[in-house]
C-alpha cells in the first residue's frame, strides 16, 4: 500500500516537473518576443494593458457561510470529496420572484464567491484541495493554464491580471453581478495606472459581459479596450440546455463522476436557476434549421397510436410545464415542489431583450473564438417508436438521443458566431468547450490579440483553426450517460 502511494506521488511530481518546464519555455518564448509595439510587435511589460478573466456556468468557486456563525466557511462548489452531500445541503435553492434572486433553502446560509488573489482564486483550480493536487485532476483546472500563460508573459496579479467569478445560479443581469463586474473593471483600470481593460470571457461569462455592456454602455466604453469572447452561447445552447431542464446536467463522465455531483442533484438546482433559462435557444433567432425537442408518445385519443411530437423553441414551455409538474425534492424531511418556473421564464425573456439590444461601443475591439469539430447536441429526442413515452413526466427519467451539429460539445458554432458585432477576428479552434481554456492555439491567438506575439513561432497552426458553419447530421446517437 505504501509503495503504491509513493509511486503515485512520484508520477504526480514528474507531471508537475513537466508542467514547470513547459511554463519556463513559455516564459522564455514570451520574453524573447517583447520589444516591439502595437498588436503585431508586442508591448513593453510596463505598458501592459490589464486583463480581466470572466468565467462561465459552473466556473467559479462557491463558498457557503452561515449568518449565525461567522467562522463557518465551507467550499461547496467545486468539491470532489462529499460533493453530492454538501451540494444538496447548501446549494439547492428557490427563486424569489419578488427580488429576482436565487436563495438557499437554508435561510441561515449565504453563498459567496471568494475574491482572494484579486479574483483569480475563484476561477483557477475549482477544487484546490490536497486530494486534487495529489492526483492532478485536471477536470477542475478551469482558467489555471491560461492564468499561468499570462503570468509567464509578464502579467502581474493585482496590477495587470484579475479574475471575476460570480454566483452562476443567478441571472446574468442581476444587480449584484453587474455591480461586481463594474467594481472589478474600475479596480483593474486604476491598478494599471488608468489603462483600459481587455476582457477575456468564457461561455456564459460572455452573456454576463453582454448584459453589462447593454445596461452600462458608457461605463463599458470608458473602461474596456478589447473583449475576447470564448465559446459564448449568444443564441443559446439548444440540445444541452433543453435537456438540462428535463434530465439535468453532468459535468464529468466515467470513473470521475463517482466523486462529483450527480446528474439529478444538479437538475434540481438548475430548475430554479435563471442563468439556465437565459441560455434556452433564442426563439427570435433565424436558425438555419430550427432546433426541436421530440417525444415519441402514445396518443390516448387514437387508441394508443404512437406518434412523434415535435416541440419548437416557442412550444417547449408547454412540454417543460407538463413534464416537470410533479417534480419535487426532499430537504430536511420536507417535500418541496419544483415545477417549471414561469416567473423565471418571464425574467429570462426580459434578459433576452437586454441581450439583443446590446451595442458594441466604437472604441471597443471585439474578438471571438469558438470550438469546432465536435458533435454538439442540437435536437433532443425522448422515447422511441418501440418504447414510447406515456405520461410526460417519464421524460425526466429517460435517456435522450440527439441530433448533432458542429460545435464544442456544448455550444453550436451557429450560436457562438451569432454575436451580431463587427468582430476584428472570429476564429474556430478544434477543441471542446472546456478544452478551449487550455488549448495552445487559443493561447497563440490571445497573445496575438493582446499584442504579445510577433514572429513565426507564435503563428497559429492552420490545421487546428477553422471557420465552419454547422451542418446537421442525420443520425441520432445516444450521448454517454455513465
Image (cartoon, rainbow, N blue to C red):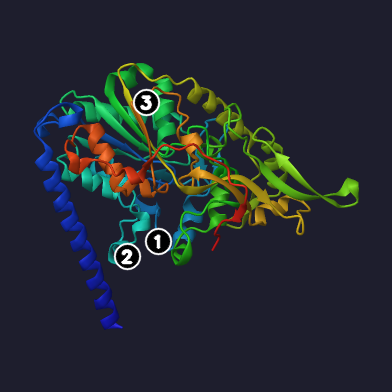
Circle 1 is placed at which residue position?
80
Residue annotated with mark 3: 423
Along the viewing direction, whichever of 184 and 151 lies nearer the viewer: 151
At mark 1, the secondary structure is: loop
Can residue 69 be seen here?
no
Q: Is residue 378 positioned above or below 352 on the image?
A: below
Q: CA distance from mark 2 to mark 3?
A: 42 Å
User: Residue 124 bears which disc, if any?
Assistant: none
Q: Secondary structure at mark 2?
A: helix
Q: Disc 3 and disc 1: Cα gap in Å?
A: 39 Å
Task: Tell me, yes or no, if residue 295 can be seen here.
Answer: yes
Q: Is residue 463 above or below residue 419?
A: below
Q: Quadrant of the N terminus?
A: bottom left
Point 11% across, 34% down: residue: 45
Q: At 28% from the left edge and 35% from the top edge, which residue is drawn?
A: 52
Pointers 1 and 2 in contact (C-beta within 8 Å): yes
Q: Nearer the viewer, mark 3 or mark 1?
A: 3
- Where residue 253 sits: x, y (%)? 48, 60
Mark identifier at residue 131? 2
Mark 1 is surrounded, within 10 Å at the Cα level, by few (under 14), some (14 to 19) or many (20 or more) other residues, namely many
How many marks on residues? Answer: 3
Relative placement, left or right, of 314 versus 355 is: right
Q: Earlier in the sequence, mark 3 or mark 1?
A: 1
Residue 386 occupies quadrant: bottom right
Identify which residue is drawn at 50% across, 35% down: 414
Amino acid at each position: 500500500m505504501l509503495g503504491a502511494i509513493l509511486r503515485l506521488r512520484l508520477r504526480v511530481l514528474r507531471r508537475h516537473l513537466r508542467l514547470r518546464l513547459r511554463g519556463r519555455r513559455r516564459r522564455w518564448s514570451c520574453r524573447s518576443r517583447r520589444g516591439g509595439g502595437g498588436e503585431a510587435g508586442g508591448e513593453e511589460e510596463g505598458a501592459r494593458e490589464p486583463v480581466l478573466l470572466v468565467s462561465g456556468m459552473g466556473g467559479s468557486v462557491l463558498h457557503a457561510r452561515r449568518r449565525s456563525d461567522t467562522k463557518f466557511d465551507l467550499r461547496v462548489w467545486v468539491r470532489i470529496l462529499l460533493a453530492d452531500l454538501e451540494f444538496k445541503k447548501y446549494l439547492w435553492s428557490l427563486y424569489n420572484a419578488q427580488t429576482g434572486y436565487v436563495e438557499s433553502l437554508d435561510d441561515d446560509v449565504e453563498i459567496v464567491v471568494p475574491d482572494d488573489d484579486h479574483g483569480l482564486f475563484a476561477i483557477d483550480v475549482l477544487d484546490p484541495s490536497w486530494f486534487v493536487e495529489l492526483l492532478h485532476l485536471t477536470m477542475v483546472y478551469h482558467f489555471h493554464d491560461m492564468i499561468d500563460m499570462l503570468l509567464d508573459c509578464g502579467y502581474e496579479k493585482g496590477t495587470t491580471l484579475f479574475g471575476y467569478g460570480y454566483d452562476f445560479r443567478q441571472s446574468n443581469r442581476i444587480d449584484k453581478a453587474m455591480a461586481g463586474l463594474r467594481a472589478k473593471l474600475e479596480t483593474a483600470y486604476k491598478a494599471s495606472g488608468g489603462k483600459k481593460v481587455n476582457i477575456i470571457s468564457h461561455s456564459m461569462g460572455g452573456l454576463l459581459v453582454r448584459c453589462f455592456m447593454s445596461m452600462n454602455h458608457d461605463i463599458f466604453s470608458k473602461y474596456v479596450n478589447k473583449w475576447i469572447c470564448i465559446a459564448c452561447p449568444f443564441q443559446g445552447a439548444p440540445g444541452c440546455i433543453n435537456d438540462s431542464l428535463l434530465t439535468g446536467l453532468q459535468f464529468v463522465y466515467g470513473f470521475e463522476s463517482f466523486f462529483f455531483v450527480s446528474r439529478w442533484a444538479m437538475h434540481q438546482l438548475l430548475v430554479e436557476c435563471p442563468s439556465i433559462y437565459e441560455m434556452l435557444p433564442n426563439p427570435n433567432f433565424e436558425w438555419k434549421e430550427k432546433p426541436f425537442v421530440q417525444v415519441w408518445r402514445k396518443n390516448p385519443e387514437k387508441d394508443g397510436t404512437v406518434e412523434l411530437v415535435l416541440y419548437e423553441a416557442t412550444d417547449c414551455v408547454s412540454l417543460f410545464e407538463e413534464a416537470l409538474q410533479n417534480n419535487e425534492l426532499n430537504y430536511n424531511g420536507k417535500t418541496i415542489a419544483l415545477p417549471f418556473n414561469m416567473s423565471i421564464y418571464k425574467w429570462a425573456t426580459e434578459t433576452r431583450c437586454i441581450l439583443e439590444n446590446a451595442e458594441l461601443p466604437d472604441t471597443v475591439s471585439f474578438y471571438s473564438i469558438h470550438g469546432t469539430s465536435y458533435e454538439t447536441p442540437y435536437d433532443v429526442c425522448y422515447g422511441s417508436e418501440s418504447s414510447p413515452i406515456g405520461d410526460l413526466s417519464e421524460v425526466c427519467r429517460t435517456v435522450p438521443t440527439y441530433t448533432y451539429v458542429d460545435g464544442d460539445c456544448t455550444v453550436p458554432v451557429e450560436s457562438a458566431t451569432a454575436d451580431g458585432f463587427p468582430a476584428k477576428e472570429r476564429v474556430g479552434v478544434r477543441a471542446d468547450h472546456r478544452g478551449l481554456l487550455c488549448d495552445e492555439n487559443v493561447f497563440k491567438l490571445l497573445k496575438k490579440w493582446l499584442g504579445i506575439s510577433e514572429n513565426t513561432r507564435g503563428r497559429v497552426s492552420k490545421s487546428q483553426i477553422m471557420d465552419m458553419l454547422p451542418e446537421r447530421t442525420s443520425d441520432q446517437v445516444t450521448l454517454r450517460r455513465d
